[in-house]
Image (spheres, grey):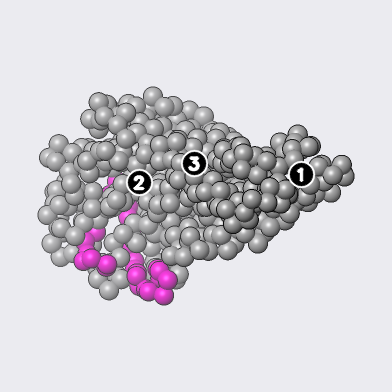
Amino acid sequence: MPHTAPSRDQPGVVATTRPADEPCARLDGIAVTVGRTPILRNLDLVLNAGEVIGVLGGNGSGKSTLLRLLATLVRPSRGRGAVLGHELGGPGTIAVRPRIALVGHLPALYPQLTLAENLHLVARLTGREERSADRALALVGLAGAAHRRAESCSQGMARRAELARVVLAEPSLLLLDEIHSGLDRDAVELVDEVVTGVRGRGGACVLVSHEPDRLTGVADRLVRIVDGRARPEPQAVDAR
Amino acid sequence: MSRPTTTPTPLARCLALAAKDLRVERRSGEALLVIAPFGAVALLLAPLAVGVDTPLLAELGPALYWLVVLLFGVLVTLRGSAVDGPHQRAMLALTGVGPRILLAGRTLGNVALLLGFELLLAPVAVLLYNPDLTGWPWLLPVLVLVAGGLAVLGSIADALAAGLDGRTSLGPLLTAPIAVPLLLGATGVLNAARYDRPPWPWLLLVVTVDLVAALLAAWCATHMEDVA
């Protein structure tokens, strides 16, 4: 039975029909090659609604590429996949992107702009009011630093500003790359709250880390990227 | 936190992107505080090379001005890929803004920057070369049309070369050959006006280059849309 995705009735977001039992993301035999280098090979992954997956792997194993693939920013060179009901590389890719949030391992802020201006830009491009961006900044504890330029913010503050962007966007698919690095205890709790919020709305999250301990208590299950393939991690975390 | 309240129009998105570029430029000063002085220096070097032949300088002045605008203007338009790193590009893509709007927004910002660049260099050229300014009102549409054409070409080159290692070399190589008719047309308009000949054919050449550039941008944007 088809159900309505949380953001389907939002202006500016193209409606999609995703059956209730259909996963948020499904990758079947996916390969991704960057330049001439194969990064992912024959990777299978299913990400169900309300699920949080932790992705482990060594440096250069393809964790970040997997996130970019799920964010529809990379096209598979082989295999098939769908994200939030849209075929990867298909015509509806751009329409589904506002329902995806990606926080990379480096901040996507414009250094010369203030934190508020960075968030206001996102708000304007997505049809939201600027005060929503201000509220999001306040929610992550950056109300006092809203008018500070991103280049003069600490790594932790930049991370919080990125989380504010996630709060603003209310994504159905949240992709976090090494999100815990540079965060204090309060901010780690903030990450948990954001993840819980996405899960509570029926969305799904993928958290990438090269430290399994970071994912303990957050992820429902772990997978490890080895030789470009996703393998279930034997010591699955099940804290929820 | 908040649902989108309105569907932003493509124009509103373009304006938001252009405003972002101009704000970044205002604070970094890369185009107008770094590149423009170099352009002024280039204008200054020509009289030093030519010597004190004032009539010759007055004759060459407009052509040298447009040459500097073309060469340094390309650098102004190519600063975009330095502003938008891979992470910023990913963030913009995930706002649902397609390549077409990204290109248009960048172009809009570039037009404003190039106009500023042209207006900064124009008095320098007048001061150094003392050109015959008969028919100067023709300069106004030419300034706008050259800025428009160069902005579109630079934005295309910037978008195509973004993320490539040879970005700084590739950009001018892609832009300069197509921009040469802009240089010829702009110089031709002023010369024609000065010698009391109709400047329309030269103006038409500049307009044609602008149109071709716009069509090229539309085609490139469609292609980028396909691969996005």
Host chain of mark 1: B
Along the line of sight, the residue nearer the viewer: B132 or A145: B132
Q: CA distance from mark 2 to mark 3?
A: 25 Å
Q: Is residue A66 above or below residue B15?
A: below
- Tag 1 near tag 2, CB within 8 Å: no
Instruction: Give the residue at mark 3.
Output: B32
Sequence-wise first label, 3 or 1: 3
**Magenta highlight on residue A58:** yes
> For the view shown, which residue lies furthest in the front direction?
B52
Q: Main secondary structure of the magenta part?
A: strand
Expressed as whole percent of the image width and height from the top left, the position of residue B118 reads 60, 41
Q: Amino acid at mark 1?
A: Leu
Q: Does residue B199 appear in this view?
A: no
Kindly indicate whether the residues beneath marks 2 and 3 are on one polypeptide chain.
Answer: no
Q: Is residue A140 above or below residue A106?
A: above
Q: Quadrant of residue B197?
A: top right
**Magenta highlight on residue B65:** no
Q: Residues within 10 Å of mark 1 (few under 14, many from 20)?
A: many
Q: Is residue A141 above or below residue A237?
A: above
Of tags 2 and 3, which is closer to the observer? Answer: 3
Of tags 1 and 2, which is closer to the observer? Answer: 1
Say the numbered circle drawn on residue A108: 2
Q: Amino acid at mark 3?
A: Leu
Span of residues in magenta: A32-61
Q: CA distance from mark 3 to mark 1?
A: 25 Å
Instruction: Give the residue at mark 1.
Output: B190
